[in-house]
Amino acid sequence: MKTMTCKQLGGPCDQTHSGDDANVIIKAQDTHLREAVKNGDSSHEDAFKAMKGRWKNPFAGMGWYNQVKKDFADLPENN
């Protein structure tokens, strides 16, 4: 299992997301951004808009996705 923060994924805070796969962490970040914005946290709005843009334009978002997968692979396993 590995852990990444909201900041490592392009967001503004230190919320952590853990999983055995980068896709699990990406989905957790998407949920975190949606909930933060829904609850009125304006600091997450830019990251939320960027996330929505990635899913609307998958080819353009592949650079971000591939970088997150690389960053995830480079992380040490949690103890």
Image: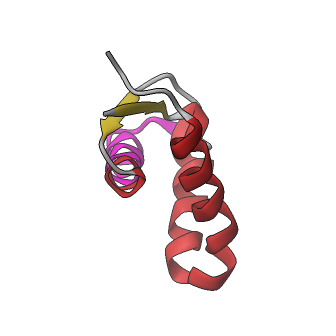
Give me the residue at 38% from left, 33% from top.
Answer: 2
Image coordinates for residue 78, horizontal then vertical, percent: 36, 22
Relative to 25, does residue 7 appear above or below in the rendering? above
Check residue 30 for magenta coloring: yes
Image coordinates for residue 9, horizontal then vertical, percent: 56, 43
Q: Hey, which residue is sitting farthest top in the picture?
A: 79
Between 49 and 28, the one lying in front of the other is 28
Numbered range of the magenta stretch: 28-42
Give me the residue at 62% from left, 43% from top.
Answer: 10
Image coordinates for residue 29, horizontal then vertical, percent: 40, 46
Q: Considering the whole magenta stretch, tell me its main secondary structure.
A: helix
Would you identify the image quadrant in which residue 79 lies? top left
Q: Is residue 17 left or right of residue 64?
A: left
- Residue 40: tell me if it is visible: yes
Relative to 70, does residue 43 appear above or below in the rendering? above
| Quadrant occupied by the N terminus | top left
Relative to 2, does residue 66 appear above or below in the rendering? below
Give me the residue at 59% from left, 38% from top.
Answer: 74
